[in-house]
Image (cartoon, coloured by chain):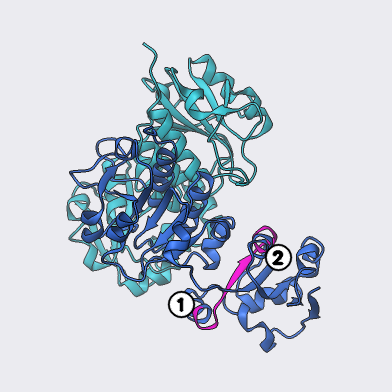
Chain colours: A cyan, B blue
């Protein structure tokens, strides 16, 4: 059972994990250095613990204790209990979902272990917005994708905002990060995946045709602003497009991912 | 040609349209009362003017004048020129896309005029998040939807954030708002549309089957938190679901809209 500790001083040094949550740069540095991440809201905190992540501590207002009672029973981590006003002072924002947890990051798994048994995977190059990363994990989980692979510069799926938008799908969908960028896609091809890059390139084919009949597929998405790098676009096995109306530039990356995941999940299978 | 007016005092009363842009409640009241909306960024300002909206004024730092020179030539509205630091003081945020315009709202068109010639339309009940409204307009525009209809309480497509996320699609896709809520869907059915509600209801059929063979389709989406009201869910002609993995609650409304628009745009046609 977690130890309940009442907090009355917002400067209490035991709250270090929870400071200044709106300062993205500071949080990135702090969370990487200390190997932690934050989960926000009863549902997400529960999913993080059920997903096997070890809690360092919890922070919540008294009224959230009951709802998370069964979760708190599974751990010896401290649970800091404080008023909502005090919580706001520490974190720098109104914690309207009431419960926060700080959890240990785990070493990223190997590519081989993430891909074991996988038939449909998502590959994200430099998606930089945490909301988009979270939304893509959620769509992938809902539409039956088995894993997500990230380029070295893709935004962190365990950043608070990614987790929240993903509704915890970052805890259930296996993922890892490529160590190198240049040969990432050829290395996937060598493992038996057909890499299909989503792009507006002139030699792209409609996504439905591009994935038809494929066994193992890796769907490759680029950044919000500029799409895929030329290297990734050209080193993919196929280039695919979501057919669009004349005069419209593009879909946003979250919408494009959802459509491409749906089409890929429903791809025609060749016997 | 717009009149260029240099501004040195952030309290200048001529800047009233541009104050406190981060205060959503204040902006909603101000924009409704004065019948205006704000466009942000060179591309979006250009699309608003090209979309036929009348500018009340422009506000920009000197370095944006050239890029929008051709747009400024088409109007007699004042263009307030000021430093980026001063612009930030007036608006309350860092105007990183540099150019703002305040434009006149137009009266909403009639349902009949919006639906004239339309074959695929989106219907949004109480989507409350401006980002989601914008993303849905953008997906609808890209995937060939002809119009968008809004329930009385759906968020405003001309709010700054909606416009930005839509990349201006709110200027090109015709839309209007239902005057009444209760009979909105039956009134569409009476006009020859099959209303297809996206829902997790037990009697829903996969979206691909639900839209197959339909001529005029109205795809109906509910709010982020609770989905459709019971009245709308039951008064739709059909209930449809996007098939999902076991154990996953749902897609976010933007992702669901993108998938449903894609499937509907590619529906099988019965001769």
Residue placed most toward the observer, A104 or A25:
A25
The answer to which quarter of the image holds residue B67 is bottom right
SS type, badge 1: helix
Above/below status of B239 relative to B23: above
SS type, badge 2: loop
Q: Which residue is mark 2?
A: B98
Left or right: residue B237 versus residue B224 is left
Q: How many neighbours does mark 1 have within 10 angstroms: few (below 14), some (14-19), or many (20 or more)?
A: few
* Residue projecting furthest to the front: B271
Asked if both marks, 1 and 2, belong to the same chain, the answer given is yes
**Residue drawn at 65 percent across, 32 percent down:** A201
**Residue drawn at 33 percent across, 40 percent down:** B211
Residue placed most toward the observer, A24 or B221:
B221
Which subunit holds the residue at mark 1? B
Position in image of residue B3 (x %, y %): 80, 78
Position in image of residue B108 (x %, y %): 48, 70
Position in image of residue B44 (x %, y %): 64, 60
Position in image of residue B174 (x %, y %): 51, 59
Left or right: residue A230 versus residue A75 is right
**Residue drawn at 42 percent across, 64 percent down:** B111
- The range drawn in magenta is B32-45
**Residue drawn at 38 percent across, 61 percent down:** B127
Q: Which residue is mark 1?
A: B25
Q: How many neighbours does mark 2 have within 10 angstroms: few (below 14), some (14-19), or many (20 or more)?
A: many
Q: Is residue A100 visible?
A: no
Above/below status of B9 relative to A55: below
């Amino acid at each position: 059972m977690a130890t309940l500790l009442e907090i009355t001083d917002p400067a209490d040094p035991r709250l270090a994990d929870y400071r200044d949550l709106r300062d993205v740069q500071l949080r990135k540095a702090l969370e990487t250095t200390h190997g932690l991440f934050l989960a926000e809201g009863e549902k997400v905190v529960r999913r993080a613990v059920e997903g096997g992540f070890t809690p360092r501590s919890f922070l919540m207002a008294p009224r959230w204790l009951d709802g998370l009672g069964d979760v708190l029973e599974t751990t010896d981590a401290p649970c800091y209990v404080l008023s909502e006003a005090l919580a706001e002072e520490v974190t720098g924002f109104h914690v309207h979902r009431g419960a926060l947890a700080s959890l240990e990051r785990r070493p990223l798994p190997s590519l081989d272990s993430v891909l074991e048994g996988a038939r449909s995977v998502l590959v994200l190059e430099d998606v930089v917005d945490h909301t988009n990363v979270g939304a893509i994990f959620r769509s992938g989980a809902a539409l039956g994708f088995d894993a997500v692979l990230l380029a070295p510069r893709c935004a962190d799926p365990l950043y608070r905002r990614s987790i929240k938008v993903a509704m915890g799908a970052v805890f259930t969908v296996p993922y890892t990060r490529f160590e190198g960028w240049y040969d990432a896609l050829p290395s996937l091809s060598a493992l038996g995946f057909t890499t299909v890059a989503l792009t507006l390139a002139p030699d792209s084919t409609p996504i439905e045709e591009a994935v038809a009949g494929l066994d193992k597929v890796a769907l490759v998405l680029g950044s919000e602003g500029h799409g895929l790098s030329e290297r990734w676009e050209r080193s993919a096995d196929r280039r695919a497009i979501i057919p669009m109306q004349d005069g419209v530039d593009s879909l946003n990356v979250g919408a494009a991912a959802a459509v491409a995941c749906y089409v890929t999940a429903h791809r025609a299978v060749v016997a």
